[in-house]
Amino acid sequence: MTWALFALLAYVAAQLLLGVVVSRRIKTEDDYLVAGRSLGPVMATFSIFATWFGAESCVGAAGEVFRHGLSAVSSDPFGYGVCLLLFGAVFAAPLWSRQLTTLADLFKQRYSPGVERVVALMLIPGSLLWASAQVRAFGHVLAATGQLPEPIGIAFAAVLAVTYTSFGGLLADAYADLIQGAVLILCLLILLCAVVLGEGGVGATWTVLTRNGPELAAPTLSPLASLNNWAIPILGSLFAQELVARTSASRSRRVAQRSVFYAAALYLFVGSIPVVLGAIAHHTLPGADPEQVLATLARKHLPSVGYLIFAGALVSAILSTVDSALLVCGSLVSHNLASLAMRDASERQKVLLARVSVVAFSGVAYLLARSAESVHGLVQEASAFGSAGVCVAGTLGLFSRRGGPLSAYGAMAAGTLAWLYAAYVAELETAFLCSLGAALAAYLACSLFEQQRAAAPLRQLSEDPEPR
């Protein structure tokens, strides 16, 4: 399989070349971070789909179904698909109207520069975990060629990812997403057909899936635990910078909203394919590595050329997602955290800082990918970490005048502390719901205090006797 590895790397090199060529059009920070706000409906739709449809949707979802059965599919594709639908229906249009460069800009506009920087610091760990999941999945695909041990595959994946990302920017990423998304959809459909035919057709495949039905039945969960599992992907990813960036990059309010709906429909349809393949592999590939299920099925049921095309499509989709996640970290550092020090910087210097930040965070993502137990676990952590407070403060700040900087600080602090305690100390099944409740309670309590403090001078003035 040495030739296969070289062919796969050549495919990746072509993607890198595309990023380098398109990146020559980048002149300003807006070009690098939000594609010059020029994306049309097709580009925006495929960019959202390809960014959302990464390692978790392919490697993670198939592996979780292979390992635990159909009970593992609440988050992907359905939870994250619902997240896209909710975002398109409620948030896409008003966020586009604010002409944001990063999500932290919303908190600067609505609350204060201090809140902006705290939000930026809270968003970076989640994006790093997301990027680490992609790097780990990329390493699994390279390792599946049989020529690279998994640790070396992950290291090589990190090097390729940082090279691709530092050159690209959102403009190059959007062009690549259009190609990568179309190829991935086609390859997943071909693989599904090949696996079904290899098992003897639709009827035989259905028999395989149902012959041990109880084995794939969902375990009994309490209503609150089930609600928690759905809330993590839906509300935990609602204010994701990766999604907000593509909304801001759309050329109109209408394009921003409709592209999210189109991407959600595409995501739910295509995301169901790895779920079905993981369920089939549960019965037909006993003893396989859960995180290499798709690659193993492709090697078993596709000819060599077909396997290479599938592996290349999977790698390029992962590159698209890791590009977006690392770009988030770079944008938050260069645009929000370093804004005071870089106040007089030129556009070229701002872009350079963003690229240097991307390289630095790629190294951290590699270390996280090496130490993690699974792709699915990384993505769950990325969706839950610190997101409750951001979700509460962002939603109320966008649609309500209630609350100020203290309310935002309180929500983010309470949400993060409650999640850390519930998840790691108390080990509750409802850790994310606890963090949401704590964030909301803190926001409302602090908003009452702010309201009373603002009213105190007026009340004191009215109580003072009139001068004689």
Image (cartoon, rainbow, N blue to C red):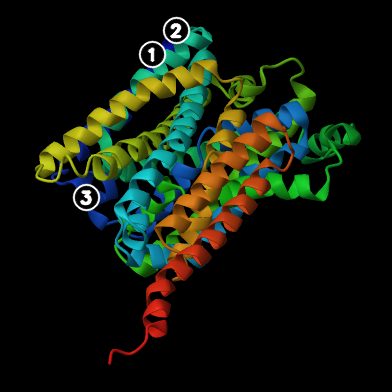
- Dot 2 alpha-carbon crowd within 10 angstroms: few under 14, some 14 to 19, many 20 or more: few
In the displayed structure, does residue 271 sit left or right of residue 224? left
Is mark 1 in CB contact (under 8 Å) with mark 2? yes
Q: Is residue 460 left or right of residue 280?
A: left
Residue type for callout 3:
Asp
Name the quadrant containing residue 158.
top left
Point out which mark residue 6 bears. Answer: 1
Q: Position of residue 395 (x, y in %)?
A: 49, 61
Residue type at mark 1: give it: Phe
The residue indicated by pointer 3 is: 30
Give how far apart the Cα atoms at labels 1 and 2 are: 6 Å
Q: Is residue 80 visible?
A: no
Q: Between tags 3 and 1, which lies in front?
A: 3
Position in image of residue 454 (x %, y %): 40, 70
Indicate left or right for 283 with 184 as reference.
Answer: right
| Distance between mark 3 and mark 1 Cα atoms | 36 Å
